[in-house]
Amino acid sequence: MSSPNKQTYDDRLLTRYLLGALPEEEAERLDELCIVDEELATRLQALENDLVDAYVRDEVSGDDRGHFESFYLSSAKRRQKVEFAAALLELEKRPAAASATVKEAAAKAKGESASAPKSASSRPLFRWGFAFAAAVLLLVAGFLLLENARLRQQMRDAQSQQAALDQRGQELQKELNDQRAANAESQKEIDRLLQWQTNWEQLRTVVIFLPPPTRGAARLPTISLPAGTDVAILLLELEADDFPAYKAALKDSVTRQVLWNSGSLRPSSLGEKRGVSISIPANLLKQRNYIVELTGVPTRGAPEPIGTYPLRVVLK
């Protein structure tokens, strides 16, 4: 069945269709016609073969080459067709000596046929048959080389995908290990708080309020620890509550040695202000000056230093 409008489908328009360069509506119309119009389908097949042959011979340029590489080569089946055409072209480019040898053999066979008796007429046929068999073997060898190259590419793709999966697996394992470590740290803090809560009624505590760090000379806050004190509670006022969590470190003011680290601290209300509270075992404190370094912990990213709270401890 022929297309009623086949005269409008010239070779250039059909080539653009093969390259995916037609508007969607027109391309869909040709898709439908290819199914019902056998003549159009045959023309398209011939044009496609010519287009593939021109591409492997580097005779396609400009926009057509761009469409060919972006659209036509997007199909694995069409890529195989291009690879096969390239293999055939490679066979055509074999050294000219082989072709000259065949022609010389044919000419010699023709001369012998003219001069030799009829009983020797089978020799040229044998030679031509041998040449044909050699050509067939070359064609098969080219196909096998092409298939081998395709299989190697598939193996490389599979190895690349496996490497990507292995990398993702390692990343997930690291995330899992980090989460387990965080959970273990949180459980330690919970156990510590539960232990303190269990004995809270029996603990003797001392509380001191520490204002936000200020520049210049200021009176050093002093906390007095009577004998038998179990816990010193420090209320650290925040100048600005900009982080979801904080951490604190108690240091010797002279040596800067870290004597104690807090867990994750959640901000809370201290009267009209916002701040965090830390509870330090009193047996860690001696009669000297200390500093508390406060660090903000963002949801993502590295912790940021907030400020330093100085204080003096006096034992009674």
Image: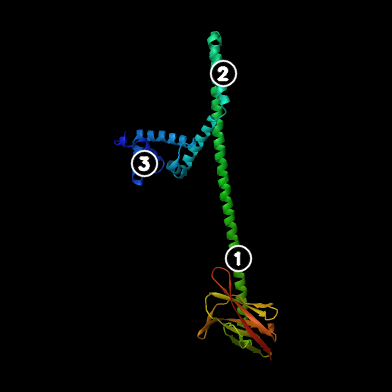
In the rendered structure, which amino acid carries the disc numbered 2?
Ala
Tell whether 315 sits left or right of 46. right
Question: Residue shown at 35%/35% (left/top)?
Answer: 40
Q: Quadrant of residue 151?
A: top right
In the rendered structure, which amino acid carries the disc numbered 3?
Asp
Q: Work out whether residue 307 or residue 116 is closer to the camera in this orientation and state it.
A: 307
Disc on res. 31? 3
Image marks 2 and 1: residues in contact by CB distance under 8 Å: no
Residue tagged 1: 178
Spatial CA distance of label 2 from label 3 is 50 Å
- For marks 2 and 1, the one nearer the N-term is 2
Q: Can I make out residue 228 in this image?
A: no
Q: Position of residue 127 (x, y in %)?
A: 56, 18
Where does the N terminus fall, quadrant-wise? top left
Question: Residue shown at 56%/19% (left/top)?
Answer: 104
Question: Residue shown at 57%/35% (left/top)?
Answer: 145
Residue tagged 2: 105
Instruction: Kindly state the secondary structure of the residue where label 1 is placed.
Output: helix
- For marks 2 and 3, the one nearer the N-term is 3
Q: Quadrant of residue 30?
A: top left
